[in-house]
Image (cartoon, rainbow, N blue to C red):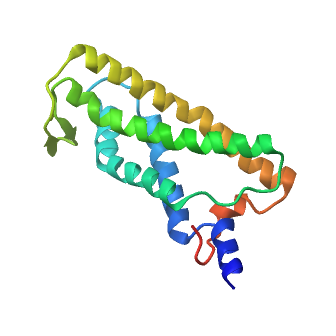
Amino acid sequence: MKDRHLSRILSGYSRSSIIIHWFTAILVIALFLTHEDDFGSAVITFHVSVGAIFGVFLIWRVIRRIMRGMTSKPEQAAIYNLASQVVIWGFLISILIVTLSGYLLPWSEGKAIDIFGLLQIPSPIAGSHDFSEIIEEVHEISGQLILPLCVLHILGALKHRFIDKDNVMQRMMKAVTNGR
C-alpha cells in the first residue's frame, strides 16, 4: 500500500499543482510579452503592476516547487533527464531572479513601485545609478532566459507525447490523487 501511494506521488501532480503550473505559465508569458515599451505606457504599467502584484505568488511558487520536489524521472537516456533538470532548475532560478530584480528595479533608483497608479510601495533603499544599471541588466538577462527554456520545455513535452508515447506530458493535464 505504501509503495503504491509513493508511486502515485512520484508519477503525477495534484490538481492544485497543475492549476499553479498553468497559471504561472500564463503569467510569465504575459509578463514576458509586455516587458518592452516606452516607460509610462499602458503596456509597461501592466508589466510593472501585474509583476508587483503576482511577484509574491511567483516567489512562493518557486519555493513550493523546490519544497515539494520533483516527480520521478521517466525511463529515457540520462542526457534527456539531465536536460530536463537543467530546464526545470533554469526556469525556477530565472523566475526567482527576474521577480526579485523586478522589485529592485524602481527601488534601485530610489522610486516607489507604482501599481496601476493606485498604490505605491516606497523604496526601502536609496537610489544608485550604478546599482540600478546592474539590476536592470540582471532583470533583462534572467527574463530573456525564459524564452529558450520555454521552447526546450515544450519540445521535451512534445517528445514525450509523440516520440516516446509515454504519460509524462499527461502529468500536467490530469491530476493524480495525492500527487505532488
Q: Nearer the viewer, residue 96 or 54?
A: 96
- Residue 80, can we see it? yes
Q: Residue at x 26, y 14 (%)?
A: 130
x and y percentages locating residue 18 in the rendered image: 55, 63
x and y percentages locating residue 129 in the rendered image: 23, 15
How many marks do you count on the picture?
Answer: 0
Q: Residue at x 76, y 49 (%)?
A: 158
Image: 114 above or below 4: above
Q: Residue at x 29, y 43 (%)?
A: 52
x and y percentages locating residue 56 in the rendered image: 32, 50
x and y percentages locating residue 125 in the rendered image: 15, 30
Q: Residue at x 83, y 52 (%)?
A: 162
- Residue 29, can we see it? no
| Residue at the top extreme of this rendering | 130
Where, by quadrant of the figure, is residue 78 drawn? top right
Image: 36 above or below 11: above
